[in-house]
Image: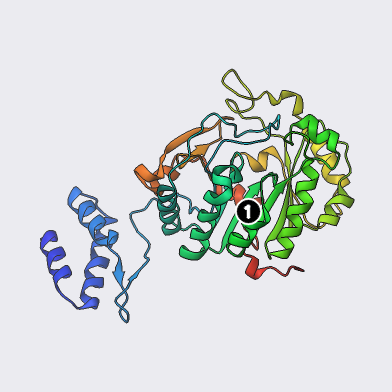
């Protein structure tokens, strides 16, 4: 009988009858869930409803979806682990040289958008290493131009970015964050945040100027550690005038910057909570400061690795899910370890589209 109702509902063109039958099936499935109901429910609710006026598919909520599964509103895609710097505390190290083909990466971004993604952040490693920045440039363009995402951002060390990149891709980028842990060249050298003899600070100020010229919001990231804990950065940060200054407490993750299988040993960079709070208090008057302790940071980011697997950091190491390309976004999210409440508590949602920012270009 139920199967007959389903066949009749899909054959009849009357939208009202179709909706009525869908409603009856969904209500009955809440009381009993025999296999026939589950099968029919998935068939019906998996189909796109048709807009009465245009006949075009419209997105609907699947009532069979686990309500505890988070919506991937903001995703960090570390598409490469390779980097030209050797920062001693890095917790996403070059344990693999793999990078997805561009078309596969775009497909993954598309299904993330369908699952509710509003903001994508490209990171690494160093994103501008791959194909001299054109790989990340094409992803940025695709996400803004084709997927129409409200926010597209990149985190970079800034050393490999060229003005020509901004000329080609700048219009599609909302935010560019450059990492800088000190305004003292010797400190940056001890940390490993430089390549050769080129000053990291020279790259930082050059990229900031290009962001202004090409109307990209400039952001600054700093990791507080034993080498910069006593530094007063207020004047330098205010001169850069970033839209946000993210200040992170140095984080240890087993297998990345600690443990037998790690490529880094960050133990000498680790600071205590009291030291981190002292740094924050010293810079509390800087209006763009956004602090993130280990507690706030560790589980409040949705992180995709180079294979598009979510990384679960709850146990102090990165445990990968299956790839969203193989099992879909919802299934992979179940193994992400994502703390959505902490994401909101730390201010993960903010004005992240440059179209909505009031910036002095």
Depicted 263 relative to depicted 100: above or below: above
Q: Where is residue 67 in the image (x, y as percent from the top left)?
A: 42, 53
| 7 left or right, relative to 163 | left
Q: Where is residue 155 in the image (x, y as percent from the top left)?
A: 64, 48
Quarter placement of the N terminus: bottom left
Question: Residue at point 35% right, 42% down?
Answer: 326
Q: Position of residue 98 (x, y in %)?
A: 48, 35
| 151 left or right, relative to 245 | left
Q: Residue furthest top?
A: 260
Depicted 13 relative to depicted 71: above or below: below
- Judging from the image, the colouring scheme is rainbow
Mark 1: few, some, or many residues within 10 Å (few <14, many ≥20)?
some
| 12 left or right, relative to 47 | left
Question: Residue at point 75% right, 68% down?
Answer: 361
Q: Residue furthest bottom?
A: 53
Q: In which quarter of the image is residue 157?
A: top right
| 357 left or right, relative to 56 | right
Asked whether 136 or 4 is in front, the reply is: 136
Asked whether 242 or 141 is in front, the reply is: 141
Q: Mark 1 points at which residue?
A: 348
């Amino acid at each position: 009988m139920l199967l007959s109702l389903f066949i009749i509902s899909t054959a009849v063109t009357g939208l009202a009858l179709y909706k009525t039958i869908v409603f009856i099936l969904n209500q009955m499935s809440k009381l009993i869930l025999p296999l026939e109901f589950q099968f029919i429910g998935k068939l019906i609710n998996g189909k796109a409803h048709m807009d009465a006026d245009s006949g075009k598919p419209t997105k609907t909520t699947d009532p069979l979806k686990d309500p505890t599964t988070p919506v991937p509103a903001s995703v960090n895609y570390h598409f490469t682990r390779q980097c030209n710097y050797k920062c001693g505390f890095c917790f996403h190290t070059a344990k693999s040289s793999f990078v997805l083909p561009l078309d596969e990466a775009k497909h993954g971004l598309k299904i993330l958008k369908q699952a509710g993604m509003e903001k994508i952040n490209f990171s690494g490693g160093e994103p501008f290493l791959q194909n001299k920045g054109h790989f990340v440039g094409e992803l940025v363009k695709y996400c803004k131009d084709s997927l129409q995402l409200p926010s597209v951002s990149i985190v970079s060390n800034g050393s490999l970015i060229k003005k020509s990149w901004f000329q080609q891709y700048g219009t599609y980028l909302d935010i560019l964050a450059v990492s800088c842990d000190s305004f003292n060249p010797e400190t940056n050298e001890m940390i490993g945040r430089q390549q050769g003899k080129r000053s990291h600070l020279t790259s930082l100020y050059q990229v900031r100027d290009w962001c202004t010229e090409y109307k990209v919001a400039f952001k600054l990231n700093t990791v507080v550690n034993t080498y910069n804990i006593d530094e007063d950065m207020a004047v330098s940060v205010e001169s850069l005038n970033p839209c946000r200054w993210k200040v992170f407490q140095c984080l240890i993750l087993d297998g990345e910057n600690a443990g037998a299988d790690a490529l880094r040993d960050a133990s000498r960079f680790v600071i205590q909570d009291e030291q981190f709070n002292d740094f924050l208090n010293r810079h509390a008057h800087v209006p763009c400061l956004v602090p993130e302790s280990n507690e706030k940071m560790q589980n409040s980011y949705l992180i995709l690795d180079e294979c598009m697997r979510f990384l679960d950091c709850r146990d102090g190491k990165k445990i990968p899910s299956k790839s969203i390309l193989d099992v879909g976004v919802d299934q992979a999210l179940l193994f992400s370890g994502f703390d959505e409440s902490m994401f909101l508590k730390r201010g993960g949602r903010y004005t992240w589209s440059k179209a909505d920012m009031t910036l002095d270009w």
